[in-house]
Amino acid sequence: MSSSSNTPATIALRKLDLASAHIVSLYRDRKPVFAALVAGLLGTLAVARAAWQDYRLFLSYGPGGIPHNILGWFISGVVLRPLRINVFDTGKFEKDEDKRSWLGDEWPKKIRAGTRPRVGPHPIPQRQLDQYGSGEMKEVSHVSSLPHGCRGNIWDG
């Protein structure tokens, strides 16, 4: 052999050729194993991508209720999600024989205009994904949720 056949590039090409021959022989000899490995890799990539998108959605809600990190996402998305209920389902109330209302007769019987807002798939923290209120409505809602003694000069500076 000449000294030019032992260059680093030639050695790397020989190793690559041996590795590719080994992979081809694995495929030829163990097709089901190779197919299972490829399917497992593709499945893992699909699940990882879906989990990443779900985690980003969880973070987009902002903090509230549970830790705003991967542990909170795991609790909300994996542990609690199977236990959630449909918050818009009124079937249980319609089946109930007791038709009394806690709202009273003076409560307006107004039908909601438009569609309901979309909510995120995570049970905690539950957030609307669309149909946000105006800035004025957010301020009124925030002030009305404060304890009565705190409502004084908060917004006046």
Image: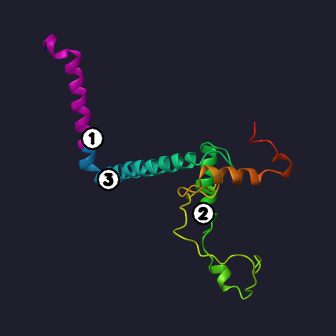
Distance (Cα) linking label 1 and label 2: 42 Å
Query: In terms of sequence position, does the residue under pointer 1 or pointer 2 come before the other?
Result: 1
Amino acid tagged 1? Ile
Which residue is located at x 24 percent, y 16 percent?
Answer: 8
Quadrant position of the N terminus in the picture: top left
Q: Residue 90's spot in the image, x, y percent?
A: 63, 77
Badge 2 marks a residue whose secondary structure is helix
**Which residues are the magenta region?**
2-24
Secondary structure of the residue carrying tag 3 is helix
Q: Which residue is mark 1?
A: 23
Which residue lies most toward the top here? 3
Where is residue 17 shown, x and y percent of the image?
Answer: 21, 31
Kindly state the secondary structure of the residue where label 1 is placed.
helix
* Residue nearest the viewer, comparing 81 with 19: 81
Determine which of the numbered discs, if any, sits on residue 82 in the image: 2
Q: Position of residue 137 (x, y in %)?
A: 64, 54
Q: Earlier in the sequence, mark 2 or mark 3?
A: 3
